[in-house]
Amino acid sequence: MIINSARFQVSNSKVEKCPSDMRHEYAFIGRSNVGKSSLINMLTGRQGLAKTSSTPGKTMLINHFLINDEWSIVDLPGYGYAKRGKESRDELRRMIEGYILGREQMTNLFLLIDSRHEPQKIDMEFMEWLGENGVPFSIVFTKMDKLSASAGKRNVAAYCAKLLEQWEELPPVFLTSSEDRRGRDEILGYIEELNKLPVGCIDDAADDEPVESPVEPE
């Protein structure tokens, strides 16, 4: 896929204020400092499109970026950074849950995982919650350039083995680096295939009552 244009569209705090256009949306989420903004900039080829920061908790809104005037990337607030008051964390949790569970246009959620770390409880619980609620998601291992080729393969294999202790099969897995652009073609190719589907055609957990997310937002 060729990215001809990528521009900021809008920021919102509530799902009902998100764009009404029936376009495919691909949301990105992960723990603090996992490299989310850098990955979005790498995928779009627009340095500075998503604002990067070394300060955890910087993303506080649902940010939409319109790509090729056809589909959108959505930058969601991260989780796992608890240096906020309970009221603020609860508000962010409602924002994240509201988008993930209530946004018909969300075709896939890309969950970012730092490839340098062992499986973290908060990530495992979040994936379990996504599964319980029938949310379509993929796993994106970031910062692969920070590891040797053998160490990277070993870490990813160990992580996938841990997941298979609870899951019958894995969701799509992507290995990426914002530094050397690793994984860019694979993710954009996956999005290109999903774009061929009608918007909102991916089933969720139907009539099941949504389960409360276990994550602590930034």
Image: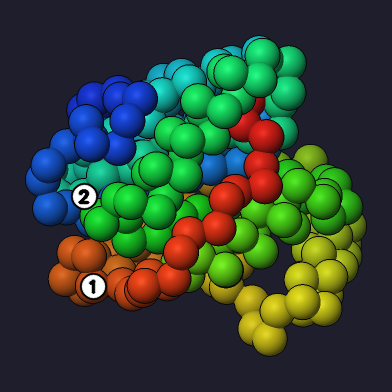
Name the residue nearer the viewer: 8 or 85.
Answer: 85
Mark 2 surroundings: few (<14), some (14-19) or many (≥20) residues within 10 A: many
Name the kind of residue labelled 2 in the image: Trp
How many marks on residues? 2
Colouring used for the render: rainbow
List x then y, in percent, for residue 84. 67, 15
- Which residue has dot 1 on it? 201
Name the kind of residue labelled 1 in the image: Cys
- Kindly indicate the quadrant of the structure image that contains residue 130: bottom right
List x then y, in percent, for residue 141. 66, 53
Element on which disc 2 rests: strand
* Disc 2 to disc 1, C-alpha distance: 15 Å
Element on which disc 1 rests: loop
Give left or right: position of 169 versus 163: left
List x then y, in percent, for residue 54. 66, 15
Give left or right: position of 96 versus 166: left
- Kindly indicate the quadrant of the structure image that contains residue 17: top left
Disc ID at residue 210? none
Please report the residue visible at 82 percent of the width from the left and 78 percent of the height from the top.
Answer: 165
Disc ID at residue 71? 2
The answer to whether 176 is drawn above or below residue 52 in the figure is below
